[in-house]
Image: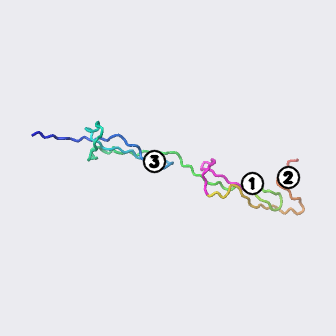
Amino acid sequence: DDILILILVCQPGPYEPATQCSKTCGNGTQTLNRTCLNIASASSSIPQTCSNVSQCGTNTSTVGTCNPDVCIICNWSTWANGPCSVTCGTGSYIRTTNCIDQFFRNCTTCTNNTGTINSRPCFYPSCTGRRRRSLTSWLLSWLGD
């Protein structure tokens, strides 16, 4: 009787599509996997996998980096006071804030918007004995208009 001895020779097959990146920005990782195949069957239409994966060595998966771009973080800037609305007495500052990223560029994804403009009181010495003027008229008189 003849005895047929079948020797399995295994090698890693082609890489499968990469897994989804672990992060949307800021250096995530993704894995490429490949199956350990019997090279005698690799040319057939349905290659057989090797049951002993250790015969393929450690080349069955690799990890790569993905999405290396810096994550953009948007926040509201600190409130900035404009000029006081009067030159004497009680008036108000018009204050503004902007949605910006960590590089001071305009952003559109800030949350908890309480408004980008508000006002705060400002106080100057009393207008008694002086005519109360708006900042605009004071500036015009100061500029010699």
First in sequence: mark 3 vs mark 2: 3
Q: In the image, what residue type sits under mark 3?
A: Cys
Q: Name the residue under label 3.
A: 21
Q: How packed is label 1: few (under 14 Cα within 10 Å), some, or many (20 or more)?
A: few
Percent coordinates x, y for residue 133 in the rendering: 86, 56
What residue sits 62% from the left and 58% below the top?
A: 112
Nearest the eye: 36 or 85: 36
Classify mark 2: helix, strand or loop.
helix
First in sequence: mark 3 vs mark 1: 3
Q: Mark 2 points at which residue?
A: 137
Residue furthest to the front in view is 45
Classify mark 1: helix, strand or loop.
strand
Percent coordinates x, y for residue 41 in the rendering: 26, 39
Q: Is residue 90 above or below residue 140?
A: below
User: Mark 3 and mark 2: span between their CA atoms?
Assistant: 61 Å
Residue furthest to the right in view is 129
Residue 89 among those drawn in magenta:
no
Q: Are marks 2 and 1 in contact (CB under 8 Å)?
A: no
Q: In the image, what residue type sits under mark 1?
A: Gly
Q: Name the residue under label 1.
A: 82
